[in-house]
Amino acid sequence: MSAIIIDGKALAAEIREKIKEDTARMTSAGIRPGLAVVLVGDDPASKVYVRNKKAACEEAGILSEEYTLPASTSEAELLELIHKLNNKKDIHGILVQAPLPSHINFKTITENILPEKDVDAFHPYNVGKIMIGDFDFLPCTPAGVMELIKKAGVSVSGKNCVVVGRSNIVGKPQSMLLLKENGTVTICHSKTENLADFTKKADILVVAVGRAEMIKGDMIKPGAVVIDVGMNRNSEGKLVGDVDFSTAKDVAGYITPVPGGVGPMTITMLLKNTLKAAELSSKIDLK
Ligand code: GUN
């Protein structure tokens, strides 16, 4: 058996087309959605992510402002910029790219972004809203994963959902979104004993651990939906996920590739959140 590939690139393009139309409608109504992306230091991967986010905004017609600061920037200086952006009328969303240099506390920074401009949904207020299932912004990667599962045409309700990874960015919020859709959710992590016992029972398996190709085909339930959030370089320098695609594709029912699966969806959800932030702040109803 060979799994059906869930094409994240195609789905992202479809959703971005709709975002582009809505952005044009908002702009004609006098409000052009605007996103500020802040990059501190010169982490090469972060530079690529920021460049991609900026390009996606421009493509959708969203105003994008990039703030690139040196690694020597102090926490106080970064906070000063955040407060300036909080008060900037043409900026509806603020994203501070992680990781930050070690002398800056990411938590302090996210807590200082206005919750209504927090398009990453990292502010404790927005995290709390996700926990109670009443949210304005969904965290970008987990929201993209939910769209991919929907695209596969598989209902989450009543299914065994296993999330491997417990990060604040993916694993924890992902579990909440699956739970909201009535999945039976198990969270596994680096200390989980006998990981395969759990993954083999998953009808829906979401993997976000950051370890190249660690989930092999024999750890997957036949026919399962497998969503690979990982983005790693293997020993040959090739971009690979957390799932060993070559063995997993013969067991899973549906699988996302790397690249071309979750990645394009994450940025798409960021655009969606920026549009939503502009919509909420301007009271323009796009429906
Ligand atoms: N670094 C890696 N992923 C993310 C993300 O989703 N948001 C931000 N702000 N930084 C990241």
Image: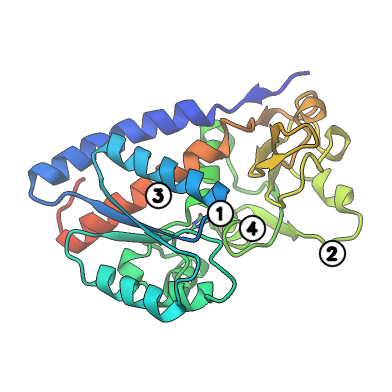
Q: Quadrant of residue 95?
A: bottom left
Q: Are marks 3 and 1 in contact (CB under 8 Å)?
A: no
Q: CA distance from mark 3 to mark 1?
A: 21 Å
Identify the residue under disc 4.
Answer: 171
Q: CA distance from mark 1 to mark 4?
A: 23 Å
Q: Residues within 10 Å of mark 2 (few under 14, many from 20)?
A: few
Q: Is disc 1 placed on a helix, strand or loop?
A: loop
Residue, x 31% and y 53% (percent of image)?
274
| Coordinates of residue 122 in the picture (x, y in percent) | 47, 66
Q: Residues within 10 Å of mark 3 (few under 14, many from 20)?
A: many
**Amino acid on which the number 4 mark rests in the picture:** Gly
Q: CA distance from mark 2 to mark 1?
A: 29 Å
Earlier sequence position, callout 1 versus callout 4: 1
Identify the residue under disc 3.
Answer: 270
Earlier sequence position, callout 2 versus callout 1: 1
Q: In front: 17, or 149?
A: 17
Identify the residue under disc 2.
Answer: 191
Q: Is mark 3 within 8 Å of ligand 1?
A: yes
Earlier sequence position, callout 3 versus callout 1: 1
Q: In front: 162, or 7?
A: 7
Against 22, residue 68 (above or below) is below
The quadrant in which the C terminus is found is: top left
**Amino acid on which the number 1 mark rests in the picture:** Asp
Q: Residues within 10 Å of mark 4 (few under 14, many from 20)?
A: many
Mark closer to the observer (1, 4): 1
Q: Is residue 142 left or right of residue 13?
A: right
Q: Residues within 10 Å of mark 1 (few under 14, many from 20)?
A: some
Q: CA distance from mark 2 to mark 4?
A: 14 Å
Residue, x 77% and y 37% (percent of image)?
234
Q: Are marks 2 and 3 in contact (CB under 8 Å)?
A: no
Question: What colour scheme was applied to this rendering of the protein?
Answer: rainbow
**Amino acid on which the number 3 mark rests in the picture:** Leu
